[in-house]
Amino acid sequence: MIIKKFVAETMSEALALVRKELGNDAVILKSTKVEKGGMFSFLGREMVEVTAATPDYNPLPPREADQDKPSETRDSPAETAKPSGPRHQPKTHMPPPPPPGAYAEQTGQAKPRRPAPEPTTGEKTHERNPSSPAVSSHRGNGRGDSPKDGIPRIEFESMRTELTDLRGTMEQLATHMKYQSAPALPEELAKRWRALVDNGMTERLAHDLTQRLSIELGKDELTDGRLIDKKLRSEIARAIPTGRLPEKGDGVRPLVISLIGPTGVGKTTTLAKMATNRKIYGGLRVALISTDTYRVAAVEQLKTFAAIAGLPVEVVYRAEEMEFAIRKHADKDVILVDTAGRSQNDQQALEELGEFVDTGDPDEVILVLSAGTRLRDQAEMIERFGQIRTTRVVLSKLDEVTTAGHLYELAGMLPREWVFLTTGQDVPDDILPARADLLAALISDVGVFKRLREERFDLEAIRK
């Protein structure tokens, strides 16, 4: 076996050198790219280096130049005229064959060997075992072992190498296209920028966050991944105002809370969770009021829930009835008001909703928004519902989205405190207090958000 390295500008040129020197049956052992021709790396050229070998049974072919001129080791006429006797072995440049297992030591895999030629007179040999791997596993076809009939190994290895290089190039191109607008940042910050974008944050906001950290942190701090994660979450948390609702009224009248929002965001389900969850108002005296007389079966839905929970419920059809319904339950601690969902594009319906809210004079007005709504639509909803006095925000249906980076931009659209996150349909369990540190973790790391979804938003399971 002959093992040799070849260096050329392209893979095709390198393979041509392999074929010329070692023949078509040569085996490619390794291919890599190297820098050649310069004192410094940026002055040199990128070359292709191929390591190839001849099979055990295939001797090194003579060079064309050697065929044109007599070889010094070729037998002389006198030697060829010697009488018969033991076969004369001509001199050759071939090195002695490697010991068994040498190929395996060089390449990490066993190479089958071709049976030795028939012994001449006077030579002794040991019979090979036909069932041994060295004999039974080899089936030469005159062109080297081939994975597919009719394809020489040298060509097959060449195609596989080129396909591997092509795949790597395509992956690099896809990554470049995906992050073509990525800012010039230190390595650790660049990783966080990509993570934010992958989690649904806009490139502009991800750029603003990472640039602020690039300015605030020192040179040594910019290489500390844990410190960068801590600072990044702190920056995000400061942009999301969170708070808590009052527990009771002022002692003169109950605490009145109205829930408003677009259609289909889960206002009624959220109200039911707030009324029965013991971490919110489940342990207090609660009454329910419904003004949603437009949606089919909306009142019946709330009455069914109230009957199961043992809560009183009032239905209000006109705005002037709100004050009477509230006075009727003056002995309660909390009164939760469910309003009809309204399209942000229906100005008349929004004005009517505002009239119900103003007549009831609630202590808190909570705007319920769905996490799955497009940001462009969210911006329009926030603007149109802004004509109604709003004090807090509930983000619903967090379980229905796959990324959370867009919540950072949503928080900037509405400077109101977030109080709850709803995470499913189960009453009363699928509701969490909105905490800035939790939201920052979900926004900055898609892995945290995925794990929390897999654990059905069980915070204790995540901490373990």
Image: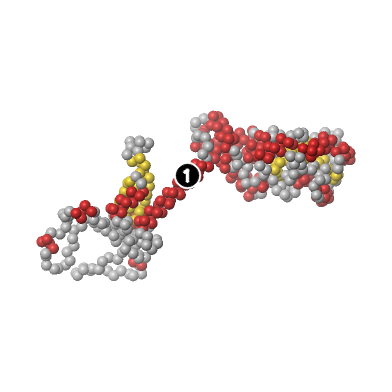
Q: Which residue is mark 1?
A: 172
Total labels drawn: 1
Give the x, y percent position of residue 321: 88, 39
Give the x, y percent position of residue 350: 78, 38
Badge 1: residue crowd in 10 Å (few <14, some 14–19, many ≥20): few
Give the x, y percent position of residue 329: 87, 40
| In the rendered image, the vertical position of residue 397 relative to residue 98, given as above or below | above
Which sits in the foreground, 46 or 54? 46
* Quarter containing the N terminus: bottom left
Residue at 16% across / 55% down in the picture? 70
Residue at 57% across / 37% down in the picture? 203
**Secondary structure under badge 1?**
helix
Report whether residue 239 is seen: yes
Amino acid type at circle 1 is: Gln
Left or right side of 426 for 18: left
Left or right side of 329 for 346: left
Where, by quadrant of the figure, is residue 347 drawn?
top right
Scheme of image coloration: secondary structure
Residue at 47% across / 44% down in the picture? 172
